[in-house]
Image: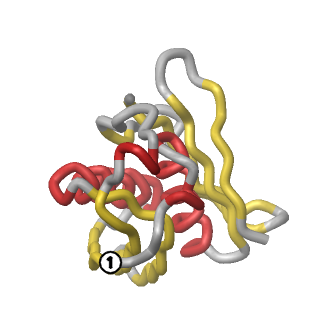
Amino acid sequence: MQYWEHFQHSADIGVRGFGGRLEEAFAQSAVALTAIITEPNRVRPQLAVKISCHCGNVDLLLMEWLNALIFEMSVRKMLFARFDVEIRNGDLLATAWGEDIDIERHQPAVEPKGATLTELKVRETDHGWLAQCVIDV
């Protein structure tokens, strides 16, 4: 089962992604990132953007992935809501689908500044994979 959630952190916002596979947990953590800004179902998957990251440590790879998404959102002035992620040997290759920001429809709440090392954790659990960290807003 795939899903995402936020968790409480003093001044920032924690994101968690869950999935039966590692890639699903990474994709769900990206949906949780979008949910910091707007309701993900408000974002239309109209444009595809390719994203790649590399890191030999899976925890740090999650941080790289989320920071790459934050960068793409900022420079392209887009929001993303659908993610296909592949991870092999420390290489993450993904496609993020989204659209240009529409202030009226998306009603953005905050702008994420970056994924942090705070509470950074990627691990396999009895129910699948967990991918989490705190996002600086």
* Residue furthest to the right: 126
* Residue furthest to the front: 104
Query: Foreground residue, 78 or 60?
Result: 78
Other residues around mark 1 within 10 Å, as few (<14) / some (14–19) / many (≥20): some
Residue 96 in which image quadrant: bottom left
Q: Residue at x 34, y 36 (%)?
A: 111
Residue 12 in percent (x, y) is at 48, 25
Query: Foreground residue, 64 or 125?
Result: 64
Rendered position, 63 above or below 88: above
Q: Residue at x 76, y 60 (%)?
A: 125
* Residue furthest to the top: 10
* Residue furthest to the left: 75
The type of residue carrying mark 1 is Leu
Q: Quadrant of the C terminus?
A: top left
Classify mark 1: helix, strand or loop: strand
Residue 103 in percent (x, y) is at 36, 44
Tell me how the rendering is colored: secondary structure
Residue 131 in which image quadrant: bottom right
Q: Quadrant of the N terminus?
A: bottom right
Q: Residue at x 22, y 49 (%)?
A: 74
Query: Foreground residue, 6 or 87?
Result: 6
Count of numbered marks: 1
Q: Is residue 119 left or right of residue 6?
A: left
Q: Is residue 137 left or right of residue 19?
A: left
Residue 90 in percent (x, y) is at 36, 74
Mark 1 lies on residue: 47
